[in-house]
Amino acid sequence: MACTMAGATRALEVKAAVLRIDQDALLPISRLDLKPDDMGFAGGVLATEDNQTTGTFLGMDYSLETVAVSPEEAQAALERLLGEGISLVVVMSDDATLLALADAAGDRALLLNATAPGDELRNDECRANVLHIAPSRSMKTDALAQYLMWKKWGDWVLIQGSHPEDFALADAYRRSARKFGARIVEERGFEDTGGARRTDTGYVLVQRQIPVFTQKMKRHDIVVAADEADVFAAHLPYHTWGPDLVVGSAGLRPVTWSPAHEAWGATQFQTRFEKLTRRYAREEDYQVWLALRVIGEAATRTGEADPASIRAYALGQEFTLAAFKGQPVTFRPWNGQLRQPILLSDGRVNVSVSPQDGYLHQVSPLDTLGTDAPETTCTAFTEEADR
């Protein structure tokens, strides 16, 4: 579909797209997590309306094209967008697809990563033509670790799934534990054996399996679930052998957005989104909205809409953007990652927001989350600056 908001003049046309790569996947454990057809796209429509509100007075015309394709069709879809003169592309994909698209685009486009969480994308595999709106895994695990240490819940049992993304998430939790002084007293692995997780017999199996699986764990304060594939974590609360607190992929979760969030003006975002879509905003919607607002802010300040100008302003010291999280968001110039607070939500209320008080940093407390400048192995951005 296409969305165009035309102002009174056409002094500057700002053309953007949201390219969503739809992977084959099992149904989520809970029907409450079923993905809407307009996932991400709805955030894009709202952001385009917001951008045009300012653009109308400045003689700017914002347009948005939304495209959903399979992984096999991704590069052809990107080429078609480039052929239409659209060089600002918000990408919703996994890590591997984002890398392939970035390499195919080269300097013809600026890609804004709305969903891929891989830490390697911000380090060894970083690309100069990609800005990361989605937080890395380590930003989220650091956000949760800070809160757990503030609560003095320093002894963790880590339960990880059997999929590659689960291993990556578990590695991020291990790094966060070392970084903030937590102790992983025991690790267990949950093997995905398939099966119908949402059938009547599935409930019976879960009620029998999880308590046995969690028997005789070493003394601990908290159970940390690393289940990015959404196989078992949702079943841990109330099913463990003992009365355990569960965090991570279930229970208390680190998220960029929650329908329960209403502080710092977030209520007006929620109500406008719900009026537009008749549903609650998901993380993907918020991250696409944020990506397009980055484009809008940079275009407004520079009067330009080409990838190089948008990128340069976004990475500069003057760029800030209100994001309904209590402080403006900015980019890390060493790897193109957007700094942003992380909400800690139990699904009904926001329990806290990280970074936590007391975690100080010489530049920004937000840089206590994820890869800091002295730790980065990303060289693409420094090489670009040296040219």
Image: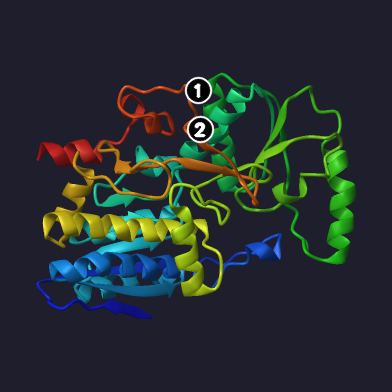
Taking the spot 53% from the left edge, 51% from the top edge, the residue there is 261
Q: Earlier in the sequence, mark 1 or mark 2?
A: 2
Residue 371 in view in this figure: no
Left or right of 387? Residue 375 is right
For disc 1, the marked residue is: 179
How far apart, in angstroms, are the residues tagged by discs 1 and 2?
8 Å
Q: Is 141 left or right of 156, judged from the image as shown?
A: left
Name the residue at 78% across, 64% down: 198
Mark number, residue 198: none
The residue that disc 2 covers is: 142
Q: Is 346 positioned to the left or the right of 47 in the image?
A: right
Looking at the image, residue 57 lies above or below residue 369: below
Are dots 1 and 2 in contact, CB under 8 Å? yes
- Disc 2 marks a residue whose amino acid type is Asp
Q: For numbered disc 2, what is the local secondary structure? A: helix
Quadrant of the rendered image containing residue 12: bottom left
Q: Position of residue 318 (x, y in %)?
A: 19, 42
Residue flagged by tag 1: what amino acid is it?
A: Lys
